[in-house]
Image (cartoon, helix red, strand yellow):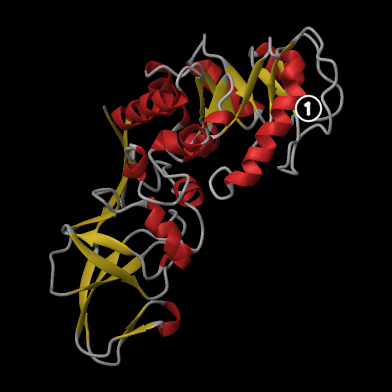
């Protein structure tokens, strides 16, 4: 028996891509599949997004782009992060975002303007050479401060107005769903594609379907007597006789130490993770003895990545990207 199983619903990714295209109302959807498709599998997520109508794929690094190119000969692939591997990118027929320095020749380039993110980006747009096919920027607060996002949209609009013949792209998932003025010619959407809310709310509020499920099982069930504990540091001490289940998943798998207190489903019922999360295991408090092998749903069936993120004091992106789907840690399955 595998320690855990990660299931990716490709139909959900297709649904989310179509939902984003609906929201974009004529603008193109460019699917962001960096970081192994936010933990969902870059190649599988990319194929599903393209099948649903996405016009391009976006990654962070040239190696990510090269890996996709091996699987998809004709896909349009944009590398958004800075790189000096221009020759490798050219050979793989990738497109490059340029946020500083010399604009490489003989490769499709996108000039990135800093409109307020304060990270990668040019202070001003130069006259684009012939190989520049797109102009882009990145929103800092589309999910949290629409007023500042509107200022960025205005700056981008003004700076790119002389070059409206080029493809202009600014919106991320949050802007695609909520900020019509940010959509321009294309939107680079990542987190919403996987059915995780960019607003840290329920994804159903924006018509999204979570694509990832993560399940394990009870590997051991034991009764703690009053005063007995489970886990490092004795962070959970039984105040009365208490049944405890041990799940063979820990922070090495992506179930973080700061997720103590979050809820999972054990045999379909909500149960609290207690004590210190170990590298390869965590404990859940039970209301009764249950058989070894009982299913534990960590994500899925209504258990949201967003809620785990809330407990951990982070964002759903980090939880999803941190799930380890390597064969030696988990079994990975696809549906749809």
**Quarter occupied by the C terminus:** top left
190 left or right of 149? left
Whether residue 94 appears in this view of the structure is yes
At 42% from the left and 73% from the top, the residue drawn is 276
- Which corner quadrant of the image does residue 307 belong to? bottom left
Q: Position of residue 315 (x, y in %)?
A: 50, 53
At 68% from the left and 12% from the top, the residue drawn is 91
Q: Position of residue 225 (x, y in %)?
A: 22, 89
274 left or right of 241? right
At 45% from the left and 47% from the top, the residue drawn is 320
- Compared to residue 3, the image places residue 327 above or below, namely above
Residue 75 or residue 12, whichever sits in front: 12
Residue 208 or residue 314, whichever sits in front: 208
* Residue for badge 1: 84
What element does badge 1 sit on?
loop
Residue 260 or residue 103, whichever sits in front: 103
Q: Position of residue 183 (x, y in %)?
A: 55, 26
- How many marks the image carries: the answer is 1
Considering every residue shown, the one lying at the far bottom of the view is 227
Q: Position of residue 6 (x, y in %)?
A: 33, 43
Whether residue 110 appears in this view of the structure is no
């Amino acid at each position: 028996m595998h320690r855990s199983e990660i299931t990716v619903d490709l139909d959900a990714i297709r649904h989310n891509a179509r939902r984003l295209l609906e929201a974009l109302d004529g603008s193109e959807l460019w699917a962001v599949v960096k970081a192994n498709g936010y933990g969902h599998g870059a190649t599988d997520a990319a194929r599903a997004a393209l099948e649903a109508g996405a016009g391009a794929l976006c990654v962070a690094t040239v190696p990510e782009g090269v890996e996709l190119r091996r699987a998809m000969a004709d896909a349009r692939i944009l590398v958004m992060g800075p790189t000096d591997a221009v020759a490798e990118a050219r050979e793989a027929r990738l497109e490059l975002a340029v946020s500083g320095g010399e604009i490489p020749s003989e490769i499709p380039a996108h000039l990135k303007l800093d409109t307020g993110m304060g990270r990668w980006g040019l202070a001003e747009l130069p006259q684009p050479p012939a190989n520049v096919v797109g102009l882009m920027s990145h929103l800092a607060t589309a999910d949290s401060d629409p007023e500042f996002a509107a200022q960025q949209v205005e700056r981008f609009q003004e700076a790119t107005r002389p070059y409206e013949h080029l493809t202009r792209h600014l919106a991320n998932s949050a802007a695609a769903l909520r900020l019509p003025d940010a959509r321009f010619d294309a939107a680079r959407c990542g987190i919403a594609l996987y059915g995780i809310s960019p607003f840290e709310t329920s994804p159903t509020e924006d018509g999204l379907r979570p694509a990832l499920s993560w399940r394990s099982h009870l590997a051991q069930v034991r009764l703690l007597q009053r005063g007995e504990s489970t886990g490092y540091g004795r962070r959970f001490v039984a105040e009365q006789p208490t049944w405890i289940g041990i799940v063979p998943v820990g922070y090495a798998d992506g179930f973080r130490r700061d997720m103590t207190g979050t809820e999972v489903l054990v045999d379909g019922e909500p149960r609290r993770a207690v004590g210190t999360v170990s590298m390869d295991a965590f404990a859940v408090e039970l209301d009764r003895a249950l058989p070894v092998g009982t299913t534990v749903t960590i994500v899925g069936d209504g258990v949201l990545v967003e809620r785990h993120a809330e407990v951990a004091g982070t964002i759903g992106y980090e939880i999803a990207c941190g799930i380890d789907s390597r064969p030696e840690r988990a079994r990975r399955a696809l549906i749809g």
